[in-house]
Amino acid sequence: MIISHKYKFIFLKTKKTAGTSVEISLSRYCGDSDIITPISPDDEKIRAKLGKYPQNYNIGSTKFYNHIPANKIKSLIGDDIWSTYYKFCFDRNPWDKVISLYYYSGNSEKQSFEKYLEQEKYKGAYNFPIYTLNHQPAVDYLGKYESLESDLKSICDHIGLPFDGWLPKAKGDFRKNRQSYRTQYNENQTRIIKQFFQKEIDLLGYKF
């Protein structure tokens, strides 16, 4: 998560949407007073090579953190900053997102995808509460993972950030099976994901 006072934007970091790659890249443009939350040690090594580190994320006894939702960000920064800064994030086709989480969390080496779904671990990929307030979108731009580069460029053009298009490959080596997500679901499993992620599907128009 980033709050940039320099460029007056708030990047809300969702799960399994290349958020770490976006965060590392955007960190390069942050000023000394901007807020940058910590990421995993391996990913921090990538950011450190750019001369950037987590900063200003502690506020007294509370702190900003990786996937902090909109309601908590707003309560920490106040209405003035929240209402005037440009807020954006990304989401992803939920069937594809769940497959990505399955491989990233190491479950593919421990249990079948069927068992993974039975244990409802897919719920960890639900992003809707991160970028909504009172069940309504709270961001100015909700981009898609599938059009990440072009959406991010549009965002940066809007806020006047001279983005060069560079995105590091963070967390990209966990998924060994690169077949289409459509090949990995049966009819019942497809329905389970549709029912749980219905709000995201309706909002962004995703289809299986």
Image (cartoon, helix red, strand yellow):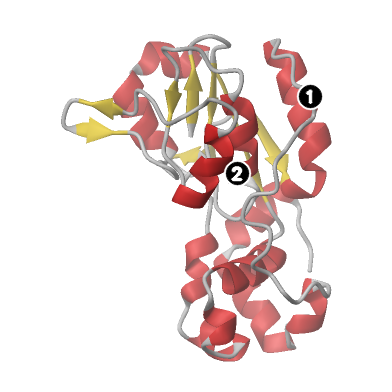
Which amino acid type is marked by label 1?
Answer: Ser
Q: Quadrant of residue 65?
A: top left
Q: Residue at x 52, y 42 (%)?
A: 45
Q: Residue at x 34, y 28 (%)?
A: 57
Residue named by callout 1: 154
Q: Residue at x 34, y 35 (%)?
A: 72
Q: Nearer the viewer, residue 54 or 130?
A: 54
Q: Position of residue 140 (x, y in %)?
A: 62, 26
Which amino acid type is marked by label 2?
Answer: Gly
Q: Does residue 195 appear in this view?
A: no
Q: Is residue 64 left or right of residue 136?
A: left
Q: Quadrant of residue 74?
A: top left
Residue named by callout 2: 19
Q: Nearer the viewer, mark 2 or mark 1?
A: 2
Of marks 2 and 1, which one's residue comes earlier in the chain?
A: 2
Q: Residue at x 64, y 37 (%)?
A: 22
Q: Quadrant of residue 148?
A: top right
- Image position of 175 with respect to 47: above or below: below
How far apart, in angstroms, are the residues tagged by discs 2 and 1? Answer: 16 Å
Q: Does residue 80 appear in this view?
A: yes
Location of the C terminus (image quadrant): bottom right
Residue 33's disc is none
Looking at the rendered structure, the secondary structure element under dot 2 is helix
Q: Position of residue 185 (x, y in %)?
A: 73, 83
| Marks 2,1: beta carbons within 8 A | no
- Image position of 137 with respect to 129: above or below: above
